[in-house]
Image (cartoon, grey):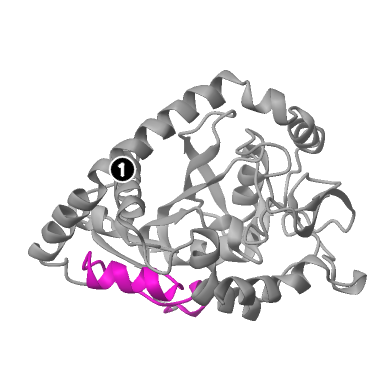
Amino acid sequence: MSLVRTRTRAARWRTAPPEETIKRCDLCDAARFDLVAERDREGEVLHTGICLRCGLVCHMAIPSEAELAEFYAVDYRSQYHGELTPSPRRVMRAWKNAERIYRQLAPHISPSDKVFEVGAGIGCNVKVFELQGHDASGIEPNLGFQAFSVDQLRARVTRGDLFNLDEEARYDLVLLVHVIEHFRSPRRALERIYGLLQPGGKLYVECPNLAAPFARPGRLFHYAHVHNFTPWTLEMMAGRCGFEVERAFSEEEDPNLQMLLRRSDTPSSMMSGLRVDADNLPRTLAALRKYNAVTYHLRWNYLRDRAGKLASYFDERLRARAYVRRLIARCQAEPSAPAA
């Protein structure tokens, strides 16, 4: 039933009439787009376009805030992951990923930094930072995943919306892990996060890398991914919203972008304006056309990563249940960090 609701809800995003298609690019405000794909990864109709000025790739019909809120609260996890609550394999994977993120960021943050995650999912990132001594909390719109984070991991994750947060709240580090691609307006989201950060505060962004590419041709686009980023469009978006790149942890050919941004002293409203990289449009088009279904799978990076994933899947099947039982026992045995 959930999948049927999801398909129905998504139908108008895919086939919106011309008057409802995107009017302005969220990055550069241009109004000219070219169609780059007519289908999503499931073969369903989904019109995806590229901005002819800056090269940002996005849906040609952008869902409303209300549609997105309902979709992520109820249907997203079941449709995208096939789960209403996270499986042991997903929890184990997310915890290991959270430990990797902490290791990357630890040299760039202070032990006393206050951490907040937007779209906290299972709650692993929040809990890992908490167990390392940080005042860590987050928000997550999905009912089942947010409940798991609180009930099982004892993470301070509430149901909430970025744009309804306390205007006075301030953090030293905000995490945005595989979330920026889901926003109706990434620009509005980053501007809101700018306001949540202390002066000099930092934002860690992780998302699929359209330039890698992260999937074979025909499997790139999904209606839940409203915007699709390359390293160049993500950096331009960050700059427009008042951030500077402190460290890029990923390479251009990595399937996921991993970027640590620093809040500039000059708010975005006072910046001199967007500097559009004229090379981004041809670079992005070249990346989209670089491989076909055969050459994509014959890449050394793909073969290496696929072998690693298969090995990890085997390990997860063997150890996930016992791993998560021990993890939950640990999280429930240690008192949660008090709110500041």
Q: Quadrant of residue 293?
A: top right
Q: Which residues are magenta?
A: 140-166
Q: Nearer the viewer, residue 91 or 163?
A: 91
Vertically, is 119 above or below 102? below
Q: Residue under circle 1?
A: 316
Give the x, y percent position of residue 287: 73, 32
Q: Where is the N terminus found, in terms of image quarters?
A: bottom right
- Residue at image location 49% in from the left, 58% down from the top: 81
Give the x, y percent position of residue 205: 49, 49
Q: Nearer the viewer, residue 212 or 301?
A: 301
Vertically, is 324 above or below 319? below
Left or right of 111 in this view: 88 = right
- Residue at image location 67% in from the left, 70% down from the top: 7
State whether residue 133 appears in this view. Answer: no
User: Most extreme residue toward the top, as rendered?
Assistant: 300
Quick one: label 1, few (<14), some, or many (20+) residues within 10 Å? some
**Which amino acid type is marked by label 1?**
Glu
Q: Is residue 165 magenta?
A: yes
Element under disc 1: helix
- Residue at image location 34% in from the left, 58% down from the top: 87
Q: Quadrant of residue 286?
A: top right
Left or right of 310 in this view: 111 = left
User: Most extreme residue toward the left, as rendered?
Assistant: 333
